[in-house]
Amino acid sequence: MSATTQTTPAPSDTKGGVLSLILQLRTYIALIAVLAFFSFAAPNFLSVASFTIMLQHIAIIAILGIGMSFVILTGGIDLSVGSTAGLAGMVAGMLILNGIVLEPLGIVIYPSIPLVIAITLAVGALVGLINGALITRFGVAPFIATLGMLYVARGSALLSSNGTTFPNLVGTAAHGNTGFPFLGAGQLLGVPVPIWLMIVIAAVAMGVAGRTAFGRYVYAIGGSERAATLAGVRVNKVKTLVYIISGLCAALVGLIISSQLVSAHPATGETLELSAIAAVVLGGASLSGGRGTILGTLIGACVIGVLSDGMIMMGVSEFWQMVIKGSVIVAAVVLDQIQKRFITGARS
């Protein structure tokens, strides 16, 4: 005769498994919690108009967060994205209002809006390239390199207009540069353009991160840069490219915000880097690199966007909003460390 022996999981193992599952699903739980809370606490929170506006705010955080995701997946950080967004808006405003002045020829060229967008995105890519070069070529720590660029980009934005605003960015038919407001306030099939941009960029980013060699290299570098180097990955090139991606996303956000406001101000984008980092970390990414998803970042951006708009609708002071956002970032990092210990304990 043969006997079948059944083992019952120990209570501690069961509790550990439940806690591990909760940690993995923490972003979804947080999103459901904030939606439920503000649905009761804030009037008209889930009305169609409020929800549409909220989605546009989420799109801004999500686009920034997607660029930040690639950086954090390699174990880096980009503190300059908010300032880059501000600089991008000022570049677009300057091109629309003042054009490109060619003093030796005594002429002024007013670029079309597609060209304005292309030039502005190129400026964002340049900022990312400089960040990447400082980190890979000169060995500057990502925190210091991007912190320095934060000030350089913000100062450049202020210098471009002596601290004033570029107003009324509607362009003129005579200059052939009308149509800029459509980028931030236009609609396609009844859906605001920024939401479409978020969807397209997220879809592309998911494909790149999950289905390309570049995406695998990004995760490999975050997991172990030395191992990736030994495996033949061109680490410096990949790390530079992720900062360029982050710069491009930041520049696009600057264009969207300036288009929505139909004006450009050098202070645009202040503290947006905090929202982007919070979205990525809330989405389950590890600040040490190698772990995280674009979908997680999107959910994290939803949490931050809902939290921000909900507090505004409830009349919460802007100062308290900063305190709460900072606390959310700290809590997200603490939970990430707890999850990391669970993963390490499970492997050992």
Image: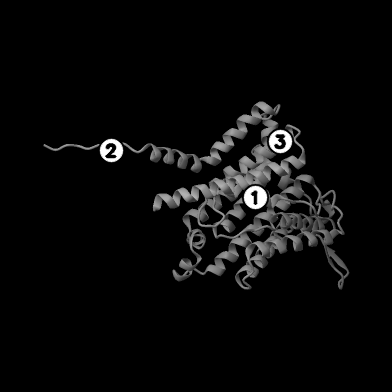
Quick check: marks 1 and 2 in contact, CB under 8 Å? no
Q: Dot 2: few (<14), some (14–19), or many (≥20) neighbours within 10 Å?
A: few
Residue 8 visible in the picture: yes
How many numbered circles are shown? 3
Mark 1 crowdedness (10 Å alpha carbons): few <14, some 14-19, many ≥20: many
Question: Looking at the image, can residue 284 be seen?
Answer: no
First reached walking from the N terminus: tag 1 or tag 3:
1
326 relative to 126, above or below:
above
Q: CA distance from mark 1 to mark 3?
A: 18 Å
- Residue bearing mark 2: 7
Q: Quadrant of residue 123?
A: bottom right
Report helix, strand or loop for mark 3: helix
Mark sitting on residue 311 = 3
User: How far, Cα to Cα, is label 1 from label 2?
Assistant: 46 Å
> Residue at position x 59%, y 64% from top?
241
Q: Which mark is residue 78?
A: none
**Quadrant holding the N terminus:** top left
Classify 103 as above or below 292.
below
Q: Does label 1 or label 2 sit earlier along the sequence?
A: 2
> Residue 36: x and y, percent?
61, 30
Q: Nearer the viewer, residue 49 or 34?
A: 34
The residue where tag 1 is placed is 276
User: What amino acid is labelled 2 in the image?
Assistant: Thr
The percent position of residue 256, horizontal first and vertical second, equals 72, 49
